[in-house]
Amino acid sequence: MIKKYITRLSYRRLFLSVLITVISLLCFSQLFYRVSIVSDNRMAPTLKKKDVVLVKKKMRLQRFDIVLCQINSQLIFLRIIGLPEEFISYSDDVLYVNGSSLEEPFLINKSVYKHDNNQLYTDSFTLSAFGELNSIPRDEYLLLGDNRPYSNDSRYYGLIHRDDIKGKLVTIIHTK
């Protein structure tokens, strides 16, 4: 009888410990992470519509990070191409940052698209497309989708303010 009571007490402690751990993890994850579902194909083939991803809320942003941003009350994923105080341009499908060319190895469909459509994968542009800018203003970012010919991104919406970037992609949890 005493043994049964001790076993019951042990199970209660174990249950409470597990419950407290789960609640703590949920609270922690809600503060620092979010699970999100990709809503479109503007980042294909890197991210596809209906992929389930983990996003870190507090983050340091770097070039080529994939970020979740809010544009016109819509949450979308885009890639950071231009950072504050940089001069960005595209010419003949080549990215230039402060006058130096930079490779974009994640654009795996670029050569196929150019061959099949006889068009540039990324149309040529400079920051003057966003107004009379010599460089990207402080706290603003140039964001583009990986699926460039079909992506509405900074070329359509303009530069994106830091406050509109809600998190950085950590990993793909599930892909469809």
Image (spheres, grey):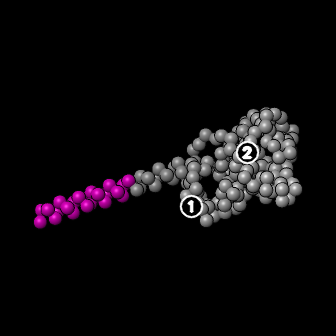
Residue type at mark 1? His
Whole-angstrom CA distance, mark 2 to mark 1, is: 25 Å
Look at the magenta stretch and give its main secondary structure. Answer: helix
Q: What element carries label 2?
A: loop
User: Is residue 163 something one can see in this rendering?
Assistant: no
- The segment highlighted magenta reads 1-21
Q: Residue tagged by mark 2? A: 104
Which part of the image, by quadrant, shows the N terminus? bottom left
Image height of 123 relative to 128, above or below: below
Within the magenta stretch, is there residue 80? no
Residue type at mark 2? Glu
Does residue 32 appear to the left or right of 65 in the view shown? left
User: Residue 59, how many percent across, how many down?
Assistant: 59, 42
Closer-to-camera residue (156/90) = 90
Point 75% across, 34% down: residue: 85
Point 49% across, 52% down: residue: 29
Residue 151 lies in quadrant: bottom right
Point 83% across, 56% down: residue: 115
Residue 138 disc label: none
Closer-to-camera residue (170/175) = 175
Point 64% across, 60% down: residue: 38
Q: What element carries label 1?
A: strand
Q: Which mark's residue is nearer the viewer, 2 or 1? A: 2
User: Is residue 18 something one can see in this rendering?
Assistant: yes
User: Residue 32, how many percent across, how many down?
Assistant: 53, 48
Q: Residue tagged by mark 1? A: 174
| Nearest to N terminus: mark 2 or mark 1 | 2
Does residue 68 appear to the left or right of 31 in the view shown? right
